Image (tube, rainbow, N blue to C red):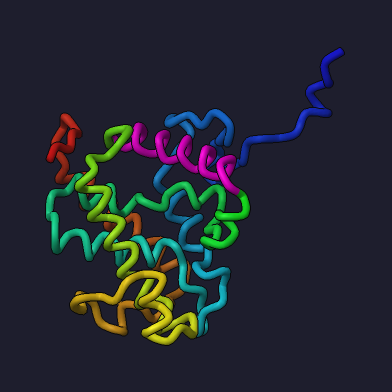
Amino acid sequence: MSASPAARPRVWQRMLSGRRLDLLDPSPLDIEIEDIAHGLARVARWNGQTTGDHAFSVAQHSLIVETIVAAVDPRPLARLAALLHDAPEYVIGDMISPFKAVMGGDYKQVEKRLQLAVHLRFGLPPELPKELEKTIKAADRLSAFHEAVLLAGFSRAEAGTFFGQPKRALLSEQDFMPRPAASVGAEFIARFQALDATTPSNRTISR
């Protein structure tokens, strides 16, 4: 005898937009950029273990990563992919690397399904070209290095062992000063809209 609907675990989250996003089978139709921006601006990097009056959010990190990628690959679609590289975390939060290692494959599968839905919603390819993936990952690690040193109490040597020593500075310390969620969320939406308005209608990335 199957469980009644009331007894089944809820696997969807209701967003402020009114959308109900199913974590096991996320539909691109249930994904809105306003929900992503709102959520990421309120998700703290480093489990909140950072200095400053505000949490250093995933949205602020994503804006920094997009800025770094833009200096290497200025194509709007590449920059959009960088801006949305951590988009699933508006649903599942920012799991620190040690916890991801503990969780293993199940976490990664949920994250992958959400990332695919985000890509389909905003016209990005299901899988990014390897070269672009490498560029975004390098930008992600560069941002993480500076966050670790400037905000999370790491020495430069210690941060270098985990994220690599940066070859050159692309941003200033001011860029990493934690900011209020509302302003970061608004900037995230503005950056998305600017990139979305300049991307080709066929929405393809090639390398």
Q: Nearer the viewer, residue 168 or 47?
A: 168
Residue occupying the far top of the picture: 1
Can residue 20 be seen in this snapshot? no
Q: Is residue 113 left or right of residue 49?
A: left
Is 116 inside the magenta-drawn segment? Answer: yes
Horizontally, is 146 left or right of 153 in the view? left
Is residue 29 within the magenta segment? no
Q: Quadrant of the C terminus?
A: top left
**Residue 178 is at least partly visible in this image:** yes
Q: Is 119 on the left-hand or right-hand side of 76?
A: right
Q: Residue at x 51, y 74 (%)?
A: 55
Which residue is painted at 55% across and 36% down in the image? Answer: 21
Quadrant of residue 1 in the image? top right
Q: Position of residue 13 (x, y in %)?
A: 62, 41
Nearest the viewer among 38 and 52 is: 52
Q: Residue at x 34, y 37 (%)?
A: 119
Quarter holding residue 28: top left
Name above or below for residue 176 compared with residue 184: below
Q: Which residues are magenta?
A: 104-123
Q: Position of residue 189 (x, y in %)?
A: 34, 55
- Measured as percent of width and height from the top left, residue 19 is found at 54, 36
Residue 120 at x, y percent in the picture:
35, 32
Residue found at the very far front of the displayed protein: 161
Relative to residue 166, is residue 114 depicted above or below? above
Looking at the image, residue 159 sits to the left or right of residue 122; the answer is right
